[in-house]
Amino acid sequence: MLPWLALPRFAEGKPVVRPAGALPATLGTHILWYDTPAAESNVLREALPVGNGRLGALVGGDPAASFLYLTDASMWLGTGDVVLGGDGQFDYTTGHFGSLVMLAKLYLSIPGHDAAHITDYRRELYLEQGYLRVS
């Protein structure tokens, strides 16, 4: 069975109900923000990560062309009672960690948003909510 077939489906025509307080009016102060775009050639260092522990994405790009590297995985397969070793690290063996599968690369093109026409560029990741915003 393909892994995404087990994910919940949204009923067509019914609104998506978010948990109370999913996006508070005032987001906290735990924010990563950058005033430069993330280059796809350096995706692992510059893109911002979002996800729920299984589905995830690395998001970057410039104002006119964004990219999302969509992934499916469960990176932690170990138990909840694992303790740090004497060197301060977890036991990084294949018994504790899964694999990462690239689902797709998604590209979003926005005409008229060339860098030459943009001022005060900012991309932000709100760590408390996993909320990503580009303005």
Image (cartoon, helix red, strand yellow):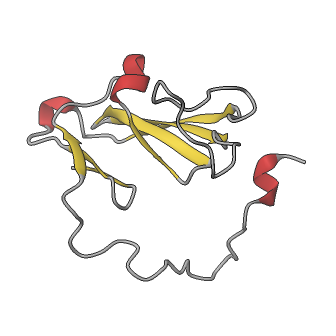
Between 5 and 54, the one nearer to me in the picture: 54
* Residue lying furthest front: 86
* Residue lying furthest top: 41
Number of labelled discs?
A: 0
**Left or right: where does residue 12 sit relative to residue 42?**
right
Between 95 and 37, the one nearer to me in the picture: 95
Q: Position of residue 114 (x, y in %)?
A: 23, 33
* Residue lying furthest right: 1
Between 73 and 103, the one nearer to me in the picture: 73
Q: Quadrant of residue 102?
A: top right
**Left or right: where does residue 134 sit relative to residue 76?**
left
Residue 66 visible in the picture: no
**Left or right: where does residue 76 sit relative to residue 22?**
right
Q: Position of residue 17 (x, y in %)?
A: 53, 81
Q: Position of residue 89 (x, y in %)?
A: 50, 29
Q: Is residue 15 above or below residue 92?
A: below
**Left or right: where does residue 7 sit relative to residue 47?**
right
What residue is rendered at 25% in x and 31% in y?
Answer: 37
Q: Is residue 80 above or below residue 111?
A: below
What residue is rendered at 23% in x and 54% in y?
Answer: 30
Q: Quadrant of residue 129?
A: bottom left
Residue 49 visible in the picture: yes
What residue is rendered at 27% in x and 38% in y?
Answer: 63
